[in-house]
Amino acid sequence: MDTIQEALDFYQQNYRGVCAYAVTDADARKTFLGSAGSAGSRTCRFCGQQSPNATFAMDAHAIPEALGNKKLFSLHECDACNRFFGSGIENDFGNWSKPARSLTRRRGKRGVPTLKGSDGAKWRMEWTGGKFFVTAGADDQDLPFTASDDLRTLTFELKREPHVPMAVLKTFVKMALTILPENELPNFREALDWIKNPVHKEDVPLLAPVLMVFTPGHQPTDTITVGVICRREHAPQTLPYAFLILVYGNEMYQVAVPSPERDPSPDAGEPLVLKAFPASATSDGSDQLYAIDLSDTEVVRDAKIISTLQFENAMRSEPEAPFSDLPREP
């Protein structure tokens, strides 16, 4: 990875922040993006329908509730689009992100996800009372991890639930299109149509993989930071026009937001090489960078993640009881 200062210099020189929000569980009030306007004047930015032809009675989460967002909402998403996204691409996103959300204690709509074995495995892992429990299944080998001799280091291999990768990508892009200020929307008309297409295909050029930076150690589990940066007028036109930056728990995602209106041609010039947005100004250099390809349009049923947790303490009890305690370095 580039040094933090190199990355900061690159993004300060070439990009400008157009919106940013920090959401914490301790926020006293809900924040609503957009204006309710006068009666009958609200317009959905995803389908273009206006009230009273469209209704706006439901709370439209600007960031999926699966990530723990209970405070940031949109006033420009109608009920029909809310249901469409919630039962479609956001469901894929929830399935894809569930193992990592469980490991890093990301509290969603129904708390921190509990994971269970499949394909004959009967293990169970969950957070209860501030502690992490893993219960073996039929025997001591029916566990989702391999352990060090002292049981303090566990390497998990967890299966993602079925999902369409491009639907996951669309969910990231939908977050960006939700929080963007109104004056930027003309640059993303094709992306708005793309995320609404229930047939997943590359209707817009996808210029770059999703970059994920994983920061080990204790990180806030009650905060979500989200924003969009857009290319400066004087910056090279060979750069993608916009990125979503999303940070929660140990993970930071950097997602190129498709803008055929402003993006460079995907087949022009040299292959695109991106610098990762600086995840933290206080990083100790142990951050891990991953490039994630979410362009597949078919259902994926066998994807897995591998993650290592280190514990301050661990205890092995009776066969039906769990390993436990809090992780120190996910």
Image: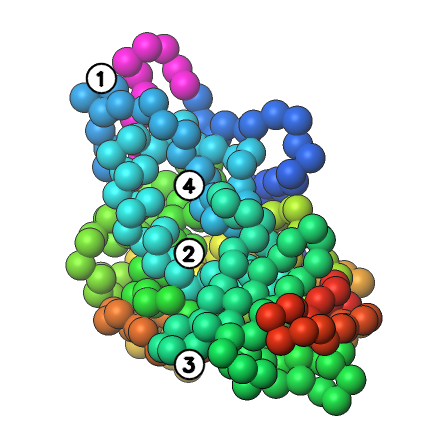
Dots 4, 2 in contact, CB < 8 A: no
Q: Position of residue 195 (x, y in %)?
A: 28, 52
**Residue picked out by circle 2:** 94
- Mark 1: which secondary structure? loop
**Residue picked out by circle 4:** 178
- Mark 2: which secondary structure? helix
Query: How many residues crowd mark 1 within 10 Å: few (<14), some (14–19), many (20+)?
Result: few
Disc 1 to disc 3, how far (Cα)? 48 Å
- Mark 3: which secondary structure? loop
Three-letter code, disc 2: Gly
Extreme bottom residue here?
Answer: 149
Three-letter code, disc 3: Pro
Query: How many residues crowd mark 3 within 10 Å: few (<14), some (14–19), many (20+)?
Result: few
Q: Is residue 160 left or right of residue 130?
A: left
* Lower position in the chain sequence, tag 1 or tag 4: 1
Q: Main secondary structure of the magenta part?
A: loop
Task: Give the residues drawn in magenta, as a range.
Answer: 36-46
Three-letter code, disc 4: Thr
* Lower position in the chain sequence, tag 3 or tag 4: 4
Residue 52 numbered mark, or none: 1
Residue at image location 40% in from the left, 34% down from the top: 60
- The quadrant holding residue 198 is bottom left
Disc 4 to disc 2, how far (Cα)? 18 Å
Three-letter code, disc 1: Pro
**Residue picked out by circle 3:** 271
The correct choice, above or below, for 233 with respect to 22 in the image is below
Residue situated in front as seen by the camera: 38 or 14: 38
